[in-house]
Amino acid sequence: MSGLSRRGLLRGAVYGAGAAVSASALSGCGSIAGSVASADEIQYWTLFTGPDGELMKTMTRNVEKRVPDLKVRTTVLDWGPPYYTKLAMASAGGRSPDVAIMHLTRLAGYAPGGLLDPWDTDLLAEFGLKPGDLNKTLVKRSLFEGTPYAIPLDTHPFVVFFDRDVMDKAGLLTGDGRLVPFESPKHALELMDKLRKDTGKLGPVFGHANDAAMGWRMFWTLFSQTGATFDLTGERAEIDEDTAVEVVRFMADLARDSRTMDVQTAIAAFANGRSPMIFSGEWDMATYKTALKDRLGGSPIPTFYDRPAGASDSHALVLPHQDNPDPEHRRRTHQFVAELVKSGLTWASAGHIPAYTPAVSSAGYAKLRPQSEYAGAAKQLVLDPPVWFAGSGSDFQTRMCQALDPALGGSSSPASAVRTMVSQINTLMAQPNPA
């Protein structure tokens, strides 16, 4: 089936699913398209708000200053399902922006259906950005049938933050200020008991209650460390359920002090000193830095099982499909993206790890603390399984979290959580990819 045919099916599926929803989504896309002021401008859709949004504006303005006559019109949309729905409909309907941000874990739901156009790596290299300059794991995941459909800007992994002073007094830091190694889940729980006893504070906290992603991130991190089977390539899931139960039980034990904490409560517990350790996304680094200042330490997720691994995703740049793109306009879009990705050191100030490896290895990055302390997380990335229904902001992650939450809160068993997870995954696998 051709990409065009798949796009036509998507259009029909979306329209057929509910006229009200489609009309609303199209209205949103229509208003965006109507904001175009000049055909010479590069139309850029992002999902960045808050500090990330301001930083992206700064980086975009800096690119415009460096490149003569390059103008970029940025449209910021609410991130999550609405963003991805509008992006898909814009591509299917022939009203797409020139370039857009996409979580790399969502690529499997877009590239196979012809909703994206491939990047010209020779053209990017002409503007100074070569595939060898980018994180290898992310580059590999950016391919569909061997062709690059995404250019990673960063990776934003699940990491650990800690209060350096408290952890040091408890004997849980090495001489160079790093977390002591955890030899096994049992050893980790023993050390966390020591932390509670020696400091009189809570153990590590983890905000997961009623969240649509955090429970899954922790599970996927720990399960990936085991190397056990989690195969979604067939008609039904093949998952090592015994190992999954063990992992969920460890999750509940490890974060027993935060069984009912949502993300904001856990952040507050860490920031106000009730707990000296938190499992968190690096995107909350600025909040912790403001509260703890130089006491803030960071680390990749420790290796509790057999191999290093940490759940992550990547903000990547994609070319939403256009039927007849202007060659010169496409060329300038490539130039814009090359310049943006090479601005990785600026982007790192938000806490994200640049995909552009020269930025990570620079002297400037080494001075960023705690960013440089957890930069090793970029070497142990595990992204969601490459299936159309997974990825950041997906219904898949929501369903996994809803299955895990009762077990983490103590109201159901780990075995029950895993049975529900597997059942939900098989339900999703039985559904056709709408694209």
Image: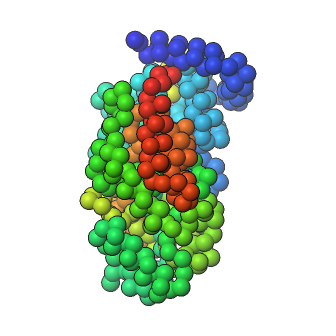
Would residue 307 be seen by someone viewing this image from the given angle? Answer: yes
- Name the residue rendered at 59%, 30% in the picture: 85
Above or below residue 261? Residue 385 is: above
Q: Is residue 207 left or right of residue 148?
A: right
Q: Is residue 307 left or right of residue 359?
A: left
Above or below residue 258? Residue 248 is: above
Would residue 65 be seen by someone viewing this image from the given angle? Answer: no
Q: Is residue 5 left or right of residue 411?
A: left
Residue 328: give x, y in percent of width and height. 47, 25
**Colouring:** rainbow
Residue 138 is drawn in which quadrant? top left
- Name the residue rendered at 32%, 84% in the picture: 175
- Name the residue rendered at 65%, 39% in the picture: 77
Circle count:
0
Q: Is residue 374 left or right of residue 70?
A: left
39 or 280: nearer the viewer: 280
Above or below residue 226? Residue 89 is: above
Residue 260: give x, y in percent of width and height. 60, 62
Residue 330: give x, y in percent of width and height. 47, 27
- Name the residue rendered at 47%, 85% in the picture: 197
120 or 151: nearer the viewer: 151
Name the quarter where the N terminus is drawn: top left
Residue 238: give x, y in percent of width and height. 33, 37
434 or 30: nearer the viewer: 434
Above or below residue 176? Residue 375 is: above
